[in-house]
Image: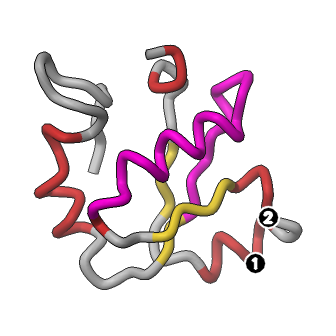
Amino acid sequence: MLRSNSFSPGLGALEHAIDALAELFADISWLLFVPYTSSEPDTYTERMRQALALLAVRVIGAHRTPDLLAALAASGAVFVGRGNFSAC
C-alpha cells in the first residue's frame, strides 16, 4: 500500500486508512517501522504505535533493532514513514 498522507480533514492519524490497514495487517503480529526521515525517530515511532493501536499490531522502530537485516527478515510487514507525520 502506498499512502501519501497520514491525515485527512477531521480525522486522526491514519484514521482514513484504518480499514485498509487492518486488512493488510490482518495476519501479522508486528511490523517494522522505518522512521529515518524524522529528526526524532523515537517520537515518530511512538506516534505510529498510537495510530496503529486499534489494529493490535506491535510497532518496532527499525532504528532500535540490534540487527536490522534480521528484523527485516522476521517482520510481518515494513511500514516506511515519510517524515511529515512527526511534524503534525
Left or right: 55, with 64 as reference point: left
Sequence-wise first label, 1 or 2: 2
Mark 2 element type: loop
Write the start and end of the magenta stretch as one range.
Answer: 32-54
- Say if the magenta span includes residue 36: yes
Quadrant (top left/top right/bottom left/bottom right) for the C terminus: top left
Q: Badge 2, how many Cα within 10 Å: few under 14, some, many 20+?
A: few
Amino acid carrying mark 2 in the image: Thr
Mark 1 element type: helix
Tell me which corner region of the image, top left, top right, bottom left or bottom right, holds residue 7: top left
**Contact, mark 1 vs mark 2 (Cβ under 8 Å):** yes
- Label drawn at residue 83: none
- Where does label 2 land, which residue? 65
- Label drawn at residue 70: 1
Measured in 3D between alpha carbons, the distance from the residue under mark 1 to the one under mark 2, in whole angstroms, is 9 Å
Task: Tell which tag, 1 or 2, sits nearer the viewer.
Answer: 2
Left or right: 56, with 16 as reference point: right
The residue under the point 75% across, 78% down is: 70
- Say if the magenta span includes residue 51: yes
Instruction: Examine the rendered structure and indicate whether residue 72 appears above or below residue 79.
Output: below
The picture places residue 68, in percent across and down from the top left corner, at: 78, 65
Tell me which corner region of the image, top left, top right, bottom left or bottom right, holds residue 22: bottom left
The residue under the point 29% across, 42% down is: 2
The residue under the point 17% across, 69% down is: 23
The picture places residue 44, in percent across and down from the top left corner, at: 59, 35
Instruction: Examine the rendered structure and indicate whether residue 33 appears above or below residue 30.
Output: above
Front-lying residue, 82 or 41: 41
Amino acid carrying mark 1 in the image: Ala
Instruction: Examine the rendered structure and indicate whether residue 37 appears above or below residue 24.
Output: above
